[in-house]
Structure formats: C-alpha cells, structure tokens
Image (cartoon, helix red, strand yellow):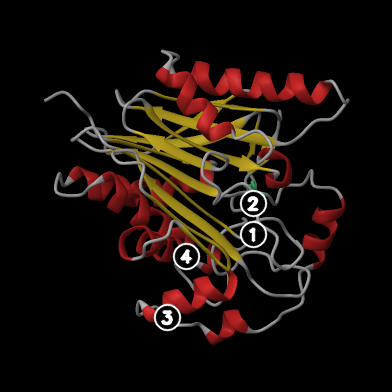
Amino acid sequence: EGVRSTVIGTWSFSRHPVEEAGKLLNNHATSAIDAVEKGLNVAEENELYGPCIVGRGGPRNSAGFLELDAAIMSGKDLNLGAVTAIRGITRPVSVARKVMEESPHSMLTGEGATSFAVSKGFVIDQELMKSRESRAEDTKCEQSYVCTVHDTLGLLALDTSGNVCSGVTTSGKPNKHPGRVGDSALPGCGFYADSTAGASCCTGDGDEILKFCPSFLAVHYMKQGKSPEEACSQVIKDIVKKLSESSKSIEMAILALNIKGEHGASATFTEWKDPLTGDIYNGFPYTVWREGNQRVQTVLAKAR
Ligand code: SD4
C-alpha cells in the first residue's frame, strides 16, 4: 500500500505518450517498463511528431537518413538496453528493450542494431531506409542550435511495486553527421534509473550534455536525500558553473522522479516553443500523470 504510480514526460508534446503509459499503469498488472516502452511507441510511430526530434517523421541526418537513438532502463536491477544510430526501424525503444531482455549485451549500434531488430521480428520500413533531403529548417537549426526544433521524448515511470524506469527515444540533432550519437541513449547521460532512489532523463544539446553524465548525477543527488526538483536544479547549477569558466553555455533540460512519486525538472533556457502547437512556454514544460488523476497535467520548470 502507499505507492501511487506516476509517469512524467519531457516537453508539452509528451502528453499522449504519458497518457498512454498512465492508462497502462492504471491497470496494476503493467510494470513501469511496459508503460514507458508503450508510451514512447506512441510518438515513435506517429508522423505527426515530425516537427519534434522524435519518431519516423523526425529530421534526417546530413546524408538524408533517419538515424535513431533509444534506450530503456529498469531501476530494480539496473538492467538496460540501448540502440544508437539505428536505421529503418519504427519503434527503436522496443528494439532497445529486446537488447536488454534477449541479448547478452546492453547496447547495439548502426547496422548491427538493425540486423538484431530483424532477427527479433521487427520489419524494416523501406521508406525509412531511403535517403531524403533534410529539410531547410533542419540545416538552419544545425548552424545555430538554438531553435525550436530540438526535442527528445523521455518518459519516467514509477509502478505500484516501487520500481522506476527511464526511457528515451530521439532522432538526435537535425542534420547530424551519420553515426553521430548524442546523450540520449548513453546510460547516465540521457537516462538513468535506480529504484533505491529514482529515475532521470535529459533533453537538449547532446554533444554537450554527455560530458556531464547529468542523469546519473540527478539520481545520485536523490540518493543523498535531495528532492527531484532540488536534484535537477543542482545538476543544472553544476553544469552552468563549469561552463561559465570557459564562457560557454548549453541548452538542456533535466527531469527526475523519485520512488515516492515526487517529480521535478530544471533547464538552462528561459523560453521554448512547442513545435506541434506553437505554444510558447517560459521555461521547460513537462507532463505528469498520477494514479487517481485521470488528466495529464503540464508543469512548467523555470530556468535556474
Ligand atoms: C541529442 N539530446 O541527440 C538529443 C536531442 C534532444 O532536445 O534532446 N533535443 O542530442
């Protein structure tokens, strides 16, 4: 008794994935890991998410290919699965889960990840295997990373048995070099979960984020007793301080959930525009579903 299942997701556009994950958790037979996987699939399969950096409609790399990174981690046993630079697959996080559960490995990359997926029954989508010109706005985005199109979907869930899970799915950075891997699918960088404390995930400029292992750090701060909000805020402060020594800054946000179902986030930026709705937020919006509440809420984390 006592644990109230909870799901949170990065950005305001995580509403439907979070809703789906919540629906599954409402039926107590579903684990946090199932909820996160199925929630992420909602965006992965949907072309509508194209303006965000997620799913089959996401921006292409500089050679015109869609290359995806995804990962999932269970906090109970620290088991994780990840795929990076995978092509031709619609639900990369489900491949990541297979890597976790049905291979002796934790991460597979590139062609090896695709052939593993095929061996597990995933069907290659020939449309996704074709090169296509990257969109004009993607090229523009690469020149100045500060743009509205930069959004990885990350979900964190807590189930009634007290297990937490962190999962992410992304097409990375618009116009990225083939083979480029960002923070998202790297453990401790873009995601982490440990059911002794909580789970975390990140979004933003992955070439910079991965230097700081922020998801691991947020979970570590929660282990030391910080609330999710304090943990995220401290991680952002640490990063901003380090970067200020060389007059640099980055765009990123971090999200955390603890095993009590408390949640929080923090970001380095002050404004973000939802690419699906055009809504402007003064900070980092994330969405929340809690058992007992039927509605998903959008919460705004301010920059610190
Ligand atoms: C990456 N972190 O591959 C991802 C992109 C992202 O918001 O999260 N954008 O760099």
- Dot 2 or dot 3: first in sequence order is 3
Residue tagged by mark 2? 275
Q: Residues within 10 Å of mark 1 (few under 14, many from 20)?
A: many
Q: Residue furthest front?
A: 104
Q: Nearer the viewer, residue 204 or 74?
A: 74
- Dot 2 or dot 1: first in sequence order is 1
Q: Nearer the viewer, residue 107 or 17?
A: 107
Q: Secondary structure at mark 1?
A: loop
Q: Position of residue 18 (x, y in %)?
A: 38, 46
Q: Residues within 10 Å of mark 3 (few under 14, many from 20)?
A: some
Q: Amino acid at mark 3?
A: Val
- Dot 3 or dot 4: first in sequence order is 4
Report how far apart the C-alphas of labels 2 and 4 lie in the structure. Answer: 22 Å
Q: In percent of the image, x 76 and y 34: which residue is there?
A: 250
Report how far apart the C-alphas of labels 2 and 3 lie in the structure. Answer: 32 Å
Q: Given contact means CB atoms under 8 Å apart, are the residues at marks 2 and 4 in contact?
A: no
Quarter of the rendering occupied by the N terminus: top left
Q: Given contact means CB atoms under 8 Å apart, are the residues at marks 2 and 3 in contact?
A: no
Q: Position of residue 272 (x, y in %)?
A: 68, 38
Relative horizontal placement of residue 208, taking residue 197 as reference (left or right): right
Report how far apart the C-alphas of labels 3 and 4 lie in the structure. Answer: 12 Å
Q: Position of residue 40 (x, y in %)?
A: 42, 55
Q: Secondary structure at mark 2?
A: loop
Nearer the observer: mark 3 or 1; the answer is 3
Q: In percent of the image, x 87 and y 53: which residue is there?
A: 143
Q: Secondary structure at mark 3?
A: helix
Residue tagged by mark 3? 118
Q: Given contact means CB atoms under 8 Å apart, are the residues at marks 1 and 4 in contact?
A: no
**In the drawing, what numbered circle is on residue 92?**
4
